[in-house]
């Protein structure tokens, strides 16, 4: 495993460095909260689950296994916590990505896209909002959160081919919506 800023932060966390832990928390809490909210569909439990992921990271700091990709580790942990919550809660026996609420997955512009004219950006966001929930979630995880196809497939219990197909559908629909204008 190479030395990355997160490797250094994880090593510092193992040495009880609260400042390093706070940096990881600040960087990943909002994306994890959104991901949890998309699964459990309730703000309170989603926030609690996201916090639990970080609490467990801090509690296990002395015995953390080597972590190659911190983001993936946190997302998988969040997914497992969500599934445990849903199975305990018994309100929803499984995750149906097609039934996710439209507002559960939001696209946020990255700094590069801020250079695009405001009108074009409005059309892009409108096109993304029109995507089916599964397409929108996959688009967000890959394009906004920077996860790899294989990581998204593992995280959502889908095949890599399904992830590729869904992203392709999302890109095609966005391009089609932009071409209409």
Image (spheres, grey):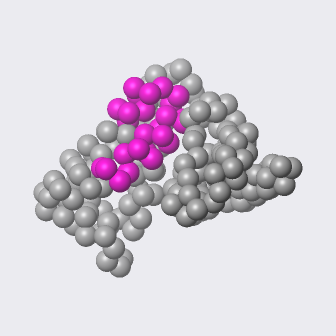
Q: Among all residues in the image, which is located at the extreme left?
A: 16
Can you give x and y, in whole percent of width and height, for residue 36 in the image?
47, 38
Q: Nearer the viewer, residue 90 or 110?
A: 110
Image quarter for residue 104?
top right
Q: Nearer the viewer, residue 80 or 167?
A: 167
Q: Is residue 40 magenta?
A: yes
**Residue ID at (56%, 58%):** 114
In the image, which residues are magenta? 25-49
Q: Is residue 31 above or below residue 71?
A: above
Q: Among all residues in the image, which is located at the extreme bottom?
A: 2
Badge count? 0
Q: Is residue 161 left or right of residue 111?
A: right
Image quarter for residue 137?
top right
Q: Is residue 123 magenta?
A: no
Can you give x and y, in whole percent of width and height, for residue 103 in the image?
59, 33
**Residue ID at (54%, 48%):** 108
Can you give x and y, in whole percent of width and height, for residue 151 in the image?
55, 59
Q: Is residue 85 above or below residue 34?
A: above
Q: Nearer the viewer, residue 155 or 138?
A: 138
**Residue ID at (59%, 51%):** 140
Q: Nearer the viewer, residue 131 or 75?
A: 131
Q: Is residue 44 above or below residue 38?
A: above
């Amino acid at each position: 495993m190479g030395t990355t800023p997160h490797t250094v932060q994880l090593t510092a966390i193992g040495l009880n460095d609260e400042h390093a832990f706070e940096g990881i928390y600040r960087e990943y809490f909002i994306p994890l909260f959104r991901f949890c909210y998309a699964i459990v569909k309730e703000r309170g439990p989603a926030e609690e689950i996201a916090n639990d992921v970080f609490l467990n990271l801090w509690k296990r700091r002395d015995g953390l296994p080597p972590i190659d990709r911190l983001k993936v580790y946190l997302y998988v942990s969040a997914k497992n916590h969500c599934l445990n919550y849903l199975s305990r809660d018994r309100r929803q026996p499984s995750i149906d990505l097609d039934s996710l609420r439209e507002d559960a997955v939001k696209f946020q512009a990255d700094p590069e896209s801020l250079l695009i004219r405001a009108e074009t950006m409005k059309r892009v966001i409108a096109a993304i909002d029109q995507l089916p929930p599964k397409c929108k979630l996959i688009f967000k995880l890959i394009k906004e959160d920077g996860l790899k196809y294989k990581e998204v497939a593992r995280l959502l219990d889908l095949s890599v081919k399904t992830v590729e197909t869904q992203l392709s559908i999302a890109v095609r629909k966005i391009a089609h919506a932009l071409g209409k204008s």
